[in-house]
Amino acid sequence: MSERREQIQSEHALTKTRRCQLLDVARSSAYYRPQPVSEEDLMLMRLIDEIYLQWPFYGSRRIVDALEDRGHHVNRKRVQRLMRLMDLHVLYPRRRTSQPGKGHTIYPYLLRELTIERANQVWATDISYIPMAKGFMYLVAIMDWHSRRVLSWRVSNTMDTGFCIEALEEALQRHGAPEIFNTDQGAQFTSEAFTDVLKAHHISISMDGKGRWVDNVFVERLWRSVKYEDVYLRAYETPTELRAGLTRYFEFYNTRRRHTALDRRTPDAVYYEQANRQLAA
């Protein structure tokens, strides 16, 4: 059967439908074979990611100009295609942010004018593109909004919902449930599989407004730190190396990296101080 499919996928004067008939293979089983991302596209994706982190308000036109300044003349449609593959969304008011899945429920944004003053009051999450020496992965992280502590994370080679749920369940198992969980309107987070986990723990669901990138700004800042302080410096070769490297980095980020916004304290110091107060109360 594999030899027959090879003949169907190969170039030939006969149409693919006719070849399926002659080889007695169902037309529905003769799928398109996806091509791997080329080395040139991977290089451009790395450059686009760097440009996006520096100027997240740049659209595809400005990114084309920035690439040209770096000596790379690239068609705008190609840049748009790569940005879609990377799941990059330009940070300016627009009609849509990340696209929810068909039929998925969108929840209201609950953080407007809310004073966030304690650990486990609000958690937030997002997904980011992570370049490697050859290829790329996606990273999801769950953060405590008040302390900036990374509670859990996962990497995956696809933008599915499964690795997001794994990260959520780990955070809930290790740290209990927050009062509010904030996400964007991406299909991974609006899916019933993801929101059902939140509902089962009686967590209020909050979702960013359309075009409101600032609603999840702390996670956006985390991506910049992860990439400039670790990923870009290491150029990880394999997913195994990436996971090991991110384990080291997030340990450093939580326990040793001081934040100006936290009065020069670490996320761990702020999180556990608040959490211990709540337990004592």
Image: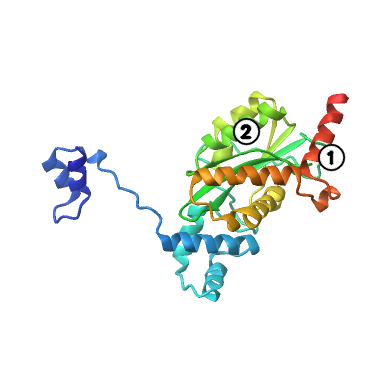
Name above or below for residue 196 compared with residue 241: above
Residue 235 falls in which quadrant of the image?
Answer: bottom right
Q: Is residue 32 left or right of residue 127?
A: left
Residue ID at (64%, 24%)? 200
Pointer 1: residues within 10 angstroms few (<14), some, or many (20+)?
A: few
Q: Position of residue 193 (x, y in %)?
A: 55, 30
Q: Earlier in the sequence, mark 1 or mark 2?
A: 1
Q: Position of residue 156 (x, y in %)?
A: 51, 42
Judge by depth and name the residue closer to the eye, 249 or 259.
249
The three-letter amino acid code for the residue at tag 2 is Leu
Whether tag 1 and tag 2 are in contact, CB under 8 A, the answer is no
Name above or below for residue 65 compared with residue 88: below
The number of numbered badges drawn on the structure is: 2
Q: Quadrant of the N terminus?
A: top left
Look at the numbered disc 2 and give the secondary structure of its residue.
Answer: helix
Judge by depth and name the residue closer to the eye, 25 or 17.
25
Residue 50 badge: none
Can see residue 104?
no
Q: Is residue 17 left or right of residue 248?
A: left
Look at the numbered disc 1 and give the secondary structure of its residue.
Answer: loop
Work out how far the residue at label 1 is from the one at label 2, CA to CA, in angstroms: 22 Å
Q: Is residue 240 left or right of residue 107?
A: left
Residue ID at (84%, 50%)? 264
Q: In the orientation shown, which residue stands out farthest toward the left?
A: 22
Q: Position of residue 13 (x, y in %)?
A: 14, 56
Q: Quadrant of the C terminus?
A: top right
Residue 203 falls in which quadrant of the image?
Answer: top right
Can see residue 250?
yes
Name above or below for residue 63 compared with residue 264: below
Residue carrying label 2: 168
The three-letter amino acid code for the residue at tag 1 is Glu
Residue 117 badge: 1
